[in-house]
Image: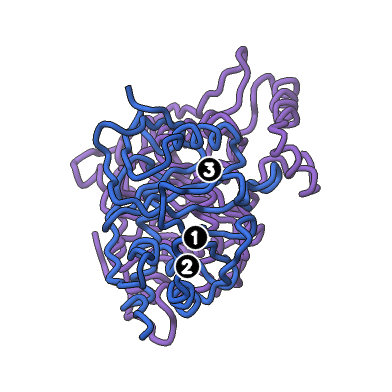
Amino acid sequence: MTTAVAMPETGYNFAYLDEGTKRMIRRAILKAIAIPGYQVPFASREMPMPYGWGTGGVQVTAAILGQDDVLKVIDQGSDDTTNAVSIRAFFARTADVAVTTRTRDATVIQTRHRIPEAPLHEGQVLVYQVPIPEPLRFLEPRETETRQLHALAEYGLMHVKLYEDIARHGHIATTYAYPVEVAGRYVMDPSPTPKFDNPKMDDCPALQLFGAGREKRIYAVPPHTRVRSLDFEDHPFRVQAFDRPCALCGAEGVYLDEVLLDDAGGRMFVCSDTDHCEERRADGHVGAEAAHA
Amino acid sequence: MLARGFADPVHDAQGVFRAVMDALARPGTIQPVATRLAPPAPLTPELAAVALALADSDAPLWLDAGLARDPAVAGFLRFHTGARITDDPAEAAFALVSDAAACPDFAIFANGTPAYPDRSATLVLAVSELGDGPGGWRLEGPGIRGSARLAASPLPADFSARLARNHAGFPQGIDLILAGPGRVAGLPRSTRVTLED
């Protein structure tokens, strides 16, 4: 579905940002692509939305967006939550670009914390909104130190953290923002996506760009790049498994959200990716509780 | 008279940037660029387009001997980008090289530091031939599914050895944009380059 959300705004440059800012962000994006997984500092601007609402992703999207792009925005897999709707409307108004909810129709997909279920393709750019870009930040608060650790490729701290998970819980208990190693060099925070999505980052045909507005960092994973989730030989990386299919469309092997139905403990589990779920239902797939839809 | 810049500064710059971004993100692919520029020779339209799209007062330009010889080139670039033209290659964000066969050693440009490998130059080389056919290099690395081919000329005879040394210094190093007529290709430092058998 491709819809025009609102009338274009006048009085703003194309895609809101001024050209000087776009050039600065573009230069950072090019270096980020050349050094996969390395966090490039950039002069993040104040945006007309609070930090934490995707100011980094919005700046990256504004810097790459062209007139012919088709934009999709998701928030935790959903096209129709507040964050996704406002950012989609923001670009429909300031850039007058076509917007869509269909994953395969989009050329630029801005995402908060999910990778779409439908496979991405060569012509696409996936832009992640990132709150804390530094994977080592909760282990070492000093930027001067984490920068040295990246320079030396000294990632022992992260392995100790994962080991402590095993010592305490019997397994690696990290379920989101699960650290990855990019192209055999930099350890990177995939943003707070569920670790379920980590395998989709490996050898992905789309270009993946990451923008952290408050922390002023941009990083990238070029297409077809090796992205390995950190693990141990005796505790290999595993994704979450769900013991039931989506209640609406019956999909298996997808990431599910829990939805409370009443005050009596009623609940169902449905696709987190709303576009994927809608397309499956349109194709005639029916889940056990499709009557609730 | 001063030659014109981009007819549409916003969308032309975006188009050139996206071509360069795709070129660096997918080494071995040839990305078309429509510039609609007629800069003073020996500045080619493609070198001019990359400079106009990406250079400004925060990103100094370095010109090779051929470009530095004619003051009209520096005048054109200064007027349309606002960028400082520097004589010191080590402080350039972008180096424009019109005579690619005489491309200077990469070591004279900023190669970044271990902590900040991004503080490094991007070299933009004008080439007359640029394609993904045989007779050139075999490319492997991020952005490439399996391996890719790239052929460009004219370039120095030892260029693939220089590219290999540049890659060996990863994450430090310089990044390259090869600009042929109406097209660009990227060679980021992450790409392993070998001569094709």
The residue lying at 70 percent from left, 31 percent from top is: A155
Q: Are marks 2 and 1 on the same chain?
A: yes
Rendered residue at 77%/39% (across/down)? A139
Type of the residue with mark 3: Thr
Task: Indicate the quadrant containing the N terminus of chain A: top left, top right, bottom left or bottom right.
Answer: bottom left
The quadrant holding residue B145 is top left
The part of the image, by quadrant, that contains residue A46 is: bottom right
Tell which chain the image draws in blue.
B
Task: For marks 3 and 1, give the CA distance.
Answer: 50 Å
Chain letter of the residue carrying label 3: A
Residue type at numbered disc 2: Arg
The residue that disc 2 covers is B69
Secondary structure beneath dot 2 equals helix
Mark drawn on residue B65: 1
Name the foreground residue: A64 vs A280.
A64
Give the chain letter at badge 2.
B
Q: Nearer the viewer, residue A59 or B44?
A: B44
Question: Contact (CB < 8 A) between labels 2 and 1?
Answer: yes
Identified by mark 1, the residue type is Ala
* CA distance separating discs 2 and 1: 6 Å
What's the distance in space between the residues labelled 2 and 3, CA to CA?
Answer: 53 Å
Q: Which mark is residue A193?
A: 3
Q: Residues within 10 Å of mark 2 (few under 14, many from 20)?
A: few
Residue at x-position 58% and y-position 43%: B173
CB-based contact (under 8 Å), mark 2 and mark 3: no
Q: Are marks 2 and 3 on the same chain?
A: no
- Chain coloured purple in this rendering: A
Q: Secondary structure at mark 1?
A: helix
Left or right: residue A207 compared with residue A145: left
Vertically, is A203 above or below A69?
above
Q: In which image quadrant can residue B60 be found? A: bottom right
